[in-house]
Image (tube, rainbow, N blue to C red):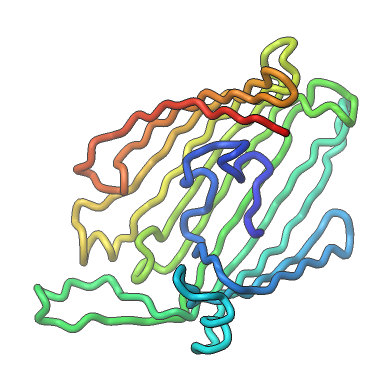
Amino acid sequence: MVDVSHYANHEYKDFINRGILRNMVLPHRTGLGAYAKAQPVDWFYFQAAAIDSQSRDRRTGFDTAFHDEALFLGMWEMGFTPKWATAKGALPGRYRLGWWYDPRSHKVFKDTLDGRLRDEFRGDDVGLYLGIDQMVWKEQDDPKDSQGLGAFGRWGWAHEDINKIDDYWEFGLSYTGLVPTRDQDVTAFAVAQGILSEQYREEVHEDASRETVFEFYYKYFATPWLIISPDFQVVVNPGGDKGAHDSIVGGVRIQVLF
């Protein structure tokens, strides 16, 4: 709904690691809400959403939205969608800026000296994010041909006193039709990093650092209805813990389209 990337948006068709598919500083809530989008011209849009911030898995959306406090997560985003003219046709892009507000109460990161000090809580959390998708090169001048190289990136920031990850960035490349005669196949690579907040490190977990994810996949169209995607990931400091062993993950995603 917000911060949607053309190249890294869904584990069914793009990357698999959540740290690449989602901006990790954004609050991810599932609950009753409302959404609206306005696009006065074809190169600019503005959208907003309000989502029940007290939603629970074992309670209905109407129960928490209308019978508890009126606390709603607010999200706003404006974006530019230019098409840069080149000799081989237009290169589409998507540049987005967003911010959010969460009224829920969060526990402040604080060393309580083994319970001798009281926990502190505060709400009214805010954050910012940026996102960029841009096709940078096309193979053919046919507007219906998608072969070419695309680049994408994300950045996010949140308050360090109540957000475990307060800084996040991502960069990646995606090429459609890199291998000769394989015009639909996609070759993609991305790196993303979630940085744990300085206050969390100082007050709660001194070994906390940052988690870095590298992911590569190749999307092979065996037939129009069968897609096979080998995937390879390297995770450095899993969970942002300097003492954790780095992880190497490999797999194959198989999709059958009906």
In the rendered image, the quadrant that contains the N terminus is: bottom right
Residue 91 as seen in the image, left or right of residue 23: right
Q: Residue at x 56, y 70 (%)?
A: 31
Q: Residue at x 37, y 76 (%)?
A: 106
Q: Position of residue 136 (x, y in %)?
A: 72, 32
Q: Where is residue 159 in the image (x, y as percent from the top left)?
A: 42, 69
The image quarter in which residue 163 lies: bottom left
Residue 249 as seen in the image, left or right of residue 175: left
Between 58 and 216, which is closer to the camera in this rendering?
A: 58
Q: Which residue is drawn at 38% across and 31% down?
A: 234
The image quarter in which residue 250 lies: top left
In the rendered image, the quadrant that contains the C terminus is: top right
Q: Where is residue 111 in the image (x, y as percent from the top left)?
A: 17, 71
Q: Is residue 184 above or below residue 258?
A: above
Q: Position of residue 124 (x, y in %)?
A: 47, 80
Between 31 and 193, which is closer to the camera in this rendering?
A: 31
Residue at the top extreme of this rendering:
180
Q: In this view, does 169 lie above or below 256?
A: below
Residue 46 as seen in the image, left or right of residue 167: right
The image quarter in which residue 98 lies: bottom right
